[in-house]
Amino acid sequence: MKPARMGIVLATLTVVLCFGPEIGWSTRVFTSVVTGTVTSTPTRTQIEVDHQVYHFKANSVADKQARTVNLGQIVDLTLDPTADTSSTTVMSIAAHGVP
């Protein structure tokens, strides 16, 4: 390999190693998770956790999972990152256990 090409390869490798995983993390979608106790029996369109009402995203997994959640159960709600800030929608529900 020519010394000029070796310099370009070393410079490229140095740049890649300096950035590390930040390049990949810039495209990752971060979601919000809310943990709390179910304070009202879930309906077909919403759930109340710690006296805060959250609506289900249409045709989401949360729609089906809400049927298995009971009053007083501790749950994790995964919120929709693409929704606007005026309405909070739930994509999925993960129960911690039986109350």
Image: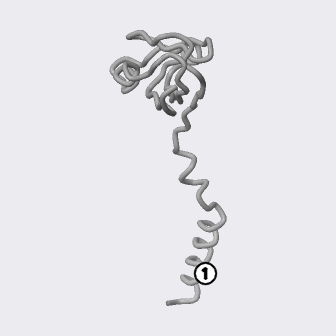
Q: Position of residue 34 (x, y in %)?
A: 59, 27
Q: Position of residue 53 (x, y in %)?
A: 55, 11
Q: Position of residue 65 (x, y in %)?
A: 38, 25
Horizontal side of 93 relative to 63 (left or right) equals right
Q: Residue at x 58, y 89 (%)?
A: 3
Residue closest to the far front: 99
Looking at the rendered structure, the secondary structure element under dot 1 is helix
Count of numbered badges drawn on the protein: 1
Quadrant position of residue 58: top left
Q: How is the image coloured?
A: one colour
As drawn, 8 above or below 88:
below
As drawn, 11 above or below 40:
below
Considering depth in this image, is 49 or 91 the residue closer to the camera?
49
Considering depth in this image, is 12 or 94 the residue closer to the camera?
94
For disc 1, the marked residue is 7
As drawn, 32 above or below 85:
below
Q: Position of residue 63 (x, y in %)?
A: 37, 20
As drawn, 77 above or below 67:
below
Q: Residues within 10 Å of mark 1 (few under 14, many from 20)?
A: few
Q: Residue at x 37, y 19 (%)?
A: 67
Amino acid type assigned to the residue bearing label 1 in the image: Gly
Quadrant position of residue 19: bottom right
Considering depth in this image, is 14 or 46 the residue closer to the camera?
46
Q: Residue at x 55, y 37 (%)?
A: 30
Q: Residue at x 42, y 19 (%)?
A: 57
Residue closest to the far right: 18
Considering depth in this image, is 63 or 21 the residue closer to the camera?
63
Horizontal side of 56 relative to 51 (left or right) equals left
